[in-house]
Amino acid sequence: MTPAEWNRGLAEQERKRGITVVRSRPTWITLETSAICNLRCVQCPRENPGRTFHENQMDYSIFSKIDRYLPYLSTLQLHGLGEPLFTGVFWQIIAEPLTRDINLSVNSNGTLLTERNVNRLLSSELNLINISLDAATGPTYRKIRGGNFDKVITGIKRLIARRKELDATRLQVWVNMTLMLENIRELPLFIDLACDLEVDGADAWHLHARSDGSLDDWRLTRGKWTFVYNEQSLHNAPALSNEMVRQAQAIAEERGFNFKPSSPQPIWLPE
């Protein structure tokens, strides 16, 4: 039994017994390696007009403070509200031999999948990179994420092609979509695109819902389009949302593709 397996078992026992002063170590840690980003996605909390956001990046000394927990970890996530591939500490951590037996994952916007970075990712200890697209077409991507869709798709293709060349099966490549009124009709196209790209899977989730009023003033104008957070929630159009999810799952089943949304929020909405 590995230290991580022993620790998971102990943590589960302590949870079941309701123990509040525990002997188990953390089994899952998330580190925001970067709060710096090169995109301005309309749904990102950093774009909320009612919130002040400061960009910074993690210092490696913070990672060194948790190294004693690494043997007991099951999962280490290296993302937050920024783009992790921007920062040196991200590259240091995924090259760290101590992380080899940990499920090491990152969410990325995929804009930095250069040839050099692709090779660095594939030679690292990273297990999963989940790339946020939020669209299946360039115009919708530009509205929501404000970037170059073709550049990201080219980067994903580069990563998949190089992975095949190296037979680097350690790294799983996923894509994901934050669902809203503006992009929900592209969800079936998104699954087709994911299949064509030959990524390992796709995920999707809804905009976060809150009842504390913190989203009420969230309004951003991008060109001729104005994003209003509460109006974009698919709770306003549950039948449309469910139909697009149904179509997407049918495509995934037909093509033998892994699309099983696992968000804490249910993907199916009450009609």
Image: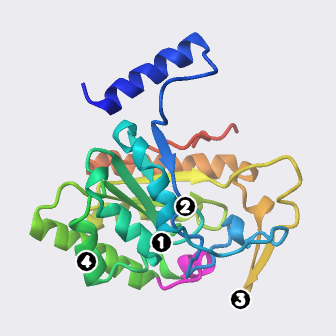
Please say if the residues under marks 4 and 3 sit with CB atoms less than 8 Å apart: no
User: Percent x, y for residue 73?
Assistant: 40, 40
At mark 2, the secondary structure is: loop
Q: Nearer the viewer, residue 129 or 256?
A: 129
At mark 4, the secondary structure is: helix
Please say if the residues under marks 4 and 1 sit with CB atoms less than 8 Å apart: no
Magenta residue span? 139-148
Please say if the residues under marks 3 and 1 sit with CB atoms less than 8 Å apart: no
At mark 3, the secondary structure is: loop
When the figure is inspected, residue 12 is found, relative to residue 130, above or below; the finding is: above
Instruction: Choose mark 4 or mark 2, whichever is in front.
Output: 2
Q: Earlier in the sequence, mark 3 or mark 1?
A: 1
User: Tag on residue 158?
Assistant: 4
Which residue corresponds to the image point at 40% horizontal and 79% vertical from the top-left?
Answer: 152
Q: Earlier in the sequence, mark 2 or mark 3?
A: 2
Which residue corresponds to the image point at 46% horizontal and 78% vertical from the top-left?
Answer: 86
Instruction: Choose mark 4 or mark 3, whichever is in front.
Output: 4
| Mark 1 nearby-residue class (10 Å; few <14, some 14–19, many ≥20) | many
Residue corresponding to mark 2: 32
Q: Left or right: where does residue 140 sit relative to residue 176? A: right
Q: Is residue 9 magenta?
A: no
